[in-house]
Image (cartoon, rainbow, N blue to C red):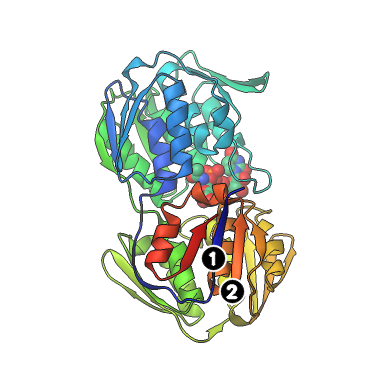
Amino acid sequence: MEKLVIKGGSPLYGNVKISGAKNSALAMIPAALLPDSPTVLENIPEIGDIAVYIEILQNLGVKVALTGKELYIDPSSIQHGSVLSPKVGDLRASYYLMGSLLGKFHEVTIGLPGGCKLGLRPIDQHIKGFEALGAKVFLKDGFVHIQAPGLKGARIYLDVVSVGATINLMLAAVCAEGITIIENAAKDPEVIDVATLLSSMGAQIKGAGTDVVRIRGGHRLRGCRHSIIPDRIEAGTYMIAAAATRGKVKIEQVIPKHLESVSAKLREMGVHIEEDEESITVYGQDSYHSVDIKTMPYPGFPTDLQQPFTSLLTQAHGTSLITDNIYFSRFEHVSQLEKMGAAITAEGRTAIVRGVTPLTGTQVHAFDLRAGASLIIAGLIADGVTSITGFRQIQRGYERLEEKLNGLGAEVWRE
Ligand code: EPU
């Protein structure tokens, strides 16, 4: 089994360039099936989840070519909405094929989505929205079947703020006749990014980035060229790593506004941060105070950085509370951090971190993507060698991780 090995103890110094946003790219690939002509997505991150999505599209008969960071998608040969590839179960974001193929063909058959196991991750809000647009949804023989004689715009109130449901409903609604209004929509930058792509294709969308998104559907869509926004979660991970190792890192090709909640928490614990138009520089300090974190929908503190931040908080004086209000079971990293010497108790939705605890390298396992990121940060701080199994999980979301970390002076390799 492949392992990521880290010899800890070196502060990170230097500059690192951030890749395109995973969670934008994963929605834009299925969005590119909506028009009849080709779309080119720029700034595609080279990560495992994208490779899986490309395979799913190829299996559907779509022409796809990845050249460097440009992904060319020509959907002109796709004739139906049946997605039978078992790879669908490897990805959470495969659910976006429901919205795009429902929009295009009014009929979809697809397996259930997969992704990180973070407790129950229902898709009831996606389904409620498709039904409001006029679709019938049922589960048979392990496949979700969605059928609509015609799609008609509707007013949809989301019971929970969901990135996935907001984007999926936008994908279907751009093909529905009339106006769709999504209320209590997610305001994440990735929602805006997808709305920008759809607008470049010819769709009419207003309000993306607020909690009410209004779509006038039924416009003919044409392929376009679009550059994906930077990955704020990758950027946040390097910010946390720089602080944890007490280094100094300039994180380049970012939108600092997208990381406001993370910068605020780092400053609150004593980290010095400077921002430019497209970069953030993190100056680690010798000593940090404990802080409490509550994850919230954007622009609140992102759940995807809760686990990496936990590793940093093992180095803060006092007791920190980390409450995940998005996922109730995103604490698989806690037992692994404890193996390294951390003093953490997980109680319900909250992890209680008592610091400062020295960490010692050992053998640990990444149960999910961001748990992996938290173990990498712990390994960078730890005394001795940490080896992390489950590396495939980490590769799903971080581009050229060893190269970037080693470029900052870390000692990281694969075995
Ligand atoms: N939810 C429902 N019903 C639904 C949809 C969501 O109850 O129909 C709940 C979820 O169980 C969760 C909350 O609403 O408690 C928010 O879920 P959301 O739908 O926003 O999450 P998602 O779209 O499935 C995306 C990212 C996740 C990220 C979350 C939250 C993708 C492919 N995934 O998931 O990314 O954690 O938004 O920001 O975009 C990651 O990158 O590591 C990752 C897990």
Mark 1 residue's CB less than 8 Å from ligand 1: no
Q: Dot 2 lies on which element?
A: loop
Above-or-below relation of 234 to 153: below
Query: Is there CB contact under 8 Å for labels 1 and 2?
Result: yes
Residue lying at 59% horizontally and 65% vertically, measured from the top left: 294
Q: Residue at x 41, y 71 (%)?
A: 409
Disc 1 target residue? 6
Q: Position of residue 169 (x, y in %)?
A: 46, 33
Looking at the picture, does residue 159 appear above or below residue 361?
Answer: above
Spatial separation of the CA atoms under disc 1 and disc 2: 9 Å
Q: Viewer-proximal residue, 56 or 207? A: 56
Instruction: Answer with left or right where residue 121 lies relative to residue 220.
Output: right
- Label 1's element? strand
Amino acid type of the residue that numbered disc 2 sits on in the rendered structure: Ala
Residue 356 is situated, as x and y percent measured from the top left of the image, at 63, 82
Q: Residue at coordinates 60% horizontally, 66% vertically from top-left?
A: 386
Instruction: Check residue 382 in the rendering and tell me which mark sits there, or answer none.
Output: 2
Q: Is residue 159 visible?
A: no
The residue sitting at 42% across, 24% down in the picture is 58
Name the residue at the front extreme.
Answer: 415
